[in-house]
Image: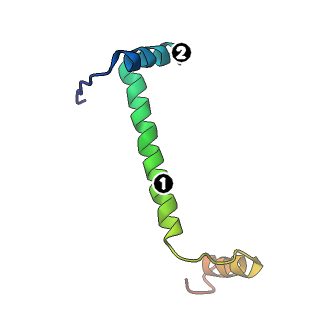
């Protein structure tokens, strides 16, 4: 595991210490790892949402749409 040292102003250090105590993190490092993981997940979700938005217009998911999917699944139609 890599090590990273950071410097914080006193008010942020106090805030971090309070969060560690309030949310029962084992250490400051555990708290910061959780924050970083959450931010990574948010960035991934944002990317997925943008990919969906940029993928073009959606198809209507009506009875005919699902019937077509069933035919593909059953090998009666080509994708």
User: Dot 2 lies on which element?
Assistant: helix
Q: Which residue does the image show at 68% across and 77% down from the upper left? A: 70
Question: How far from the left and from the top, in percent, is residue 71?
Answer: 66, 81
Q: Which residue does the image show at 42% across and 19% down from the upper left? A: 16
Instruction: Give me the disc on residue 61.
Output: none
Question: How far from the left and from the top, in percent, is residue 23?
Answer: 53, 19
User: Dot 1 lies on which element?
Assistant: helix
Whether residue 38 is situated above or below residue 28 in the rendered picture = below
Q: Which residue does the image show at 53% across and 67% down from the upper left? A: 53
Question: How far from the left and from the top, in percent, is residue 63?
Answer: 76, 78
According to the picture, the residue beneath numbered tag 2 turns out to be: 22
Quadrant of image for the N terminus: top left
**Residue 3 left/right relative to 29:** left
Q: How is the image coloured?
A: rainbow
According to the picture, the residue beneath numbered tag 1 turns out to be: 46
Q: Which residue does the image show at 72% across and 80% down from the upper left? A: 67
């Amino acid at each position: 595991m890599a090590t990273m040292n950071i410097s914080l102003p006193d008010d942020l250090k106090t805030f971090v210490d309070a969060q560690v105590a309030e949310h029962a993190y084992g250490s400051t490092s555990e708290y910061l790892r959780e924050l970083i993981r959450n931010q990574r997940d948010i960035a991934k979700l944002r990317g997925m949402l943008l990919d969906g938005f940029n993928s073009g217009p959606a198809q209507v998911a009506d009875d005919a749409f699902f019937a077509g999917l069933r035919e593909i699944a059953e090998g009666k139609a080509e994708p």
